[in-house]
Image (spheres, rainbow, N blue to C red):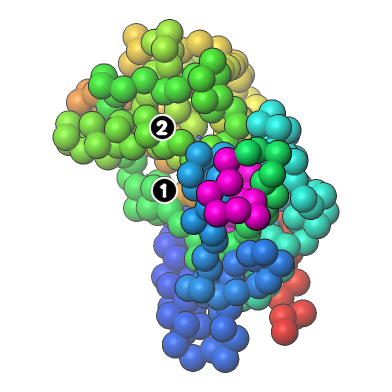
Amino acid sequence: TGIGQVIMDTVAGGAIRYSDYVLSSDNPCAGGCAWIEGRYVASAEARISIFDAGFGHSDVTYTVASVWHGNIFRLDEHVERFLAGAARMRLESPLGKQAIIDIMKECVARSELREAYVNVSLTRGFGQRPGEKNIEALTSQIYAYAIPYLWVFTPHEQIGGISAVIAREVKRAGANCIDPQVKNYQWGDLLRATFEAQARGARTAFLLDADNYLSEGPGFNVCMIKEGKVLTPSRNVLPGITRKTALEIAVSLGLEVELRDIDSELLKSAEEVFTTTTAGGVTPVIELDGQPVGDGRPGRWTTAIRDRYWALMDEPCALIEPIDYSRRP
Ligand code: PLP
């Protein structure tokens, strides 16, 4: 497809530029830049304390925004979600929203990357004493980095579709234990499901919550389409920015949208299924638990939403903001 070619060309060009930066640039942050304890460093040098509670207790939340063709997408909303999640975890950010936004953009500018994965994390941090466990004695930390764009699902998979299984061996932690609405690194359940998918010969897995309703998968939200309606879980999922974008596109295409509980039976009756994530856009699911979804090819609505999503990345509008690469030191 046309848009598929656009993605492919960008990926090929980005890969070439990436190796060029790393091999020939005199800018040490070219190809990847991190902000740690107040300093910008090359991604290869990015290190944090082993005593940070983000590591020891997964006492951390984060978000990932993307840069495409030099524009950063929905950054403001990413940082809003990030700070809202932090508040739910009683994590106090040492920096305000604008300072965080500025650091993320600066990481991108210094990396020189036109297609980037831009992560910001807030941890409970560390104290004066090594291994300090008293929460009151810890100083929270912001870390950020920009690295080459990462694909949860490759451009090939976004075009051709993927297979998935509904995990049987593990459930998604829910709001009553580790709230998936707050973006977190406690990937134990998502990783077990990934291994189960591998064992069952599928590309990825969808997890059910404790009530046996669909939640999400390792790094993505899930949507289904049936009878002109896009359905997606109302609870026990991250409110994904890509899902929000896909749902807005769906409405603009004349589809209805409903957030609701989805059990396996309803999911398996879908005409189309797709995943959404910042790190890889909109991916059709063409096989579920060994059975074709619809006619076993990427559905027409999914394809339209995917193509519109990638087109949006290039359209001057309130959702994208150009990175200023000229100020790099
Ligand atoms: N769900 C989980 C568990 C994720 O890790 C992610 C993204 O990394 C998503 C959903 C998708 O969220 P977004 O579209 O904001 O990237």
Question: Eyeballing the image, is 101 above or below 285?
Answer: below
> Magenta span has 89?
no
Q: Which mark is residue 204?
A: none
Image quarter of residue 329: bottom right
Picture coordinates of residue 35 (x, y %)? 64, 65
At x 51% / y 20%, what residue is drawn? Answer: 177
- The residue that label 1 is drawn on is 152
Residue 257 versus residue 26: which sits nearer the camera?
26
Residues packed near mark 1 inside 10 Å, few (<14), some (14 to 19) or many (20 plus): some
- The residue that label 2 is drawn on is 217
Counting residues from the start of the chain, the first of labels 1 and 2 encountered is: 1
Image quarter of residue 275: top left
* Amino acid type at image mark 2: Gly
Residues packed near mark 2 inside 10 Å, few (<14), some (14 to 19) or many (20 plus): many
Q: CA distance from mark 1 to mark 2?
A: 11 Å
Question: Eyeballing the image, is 197 above or below 22?
Answer: above
Picture coordinates of residue 125 (x, y %)? 63, 49
* Residue 189 relative to residue 178: left or right: left
Image quarter of residue 39: bottom right
> Is the Cβ of the residue at disc 1 closer than 8 Å to that at disc 2?
no
The boundaries of the magenta stretch are 115-133
* Amino acid type at image mark 1: Val
* Residue 183 relative to residue 222: left or right: right
Whether disc 1's CB lies below 8 Å from ligand 1 is answered: yes
Secondary structure under badge 1?
loop
* Residue 286 relative to residue 224: left or right: left
At x 52% / y 65%, what residue is drawn? Answer: 47
Picture coordinates of residue 20 (x, y %)? 46, 84
> Magenta span has 120?
yes
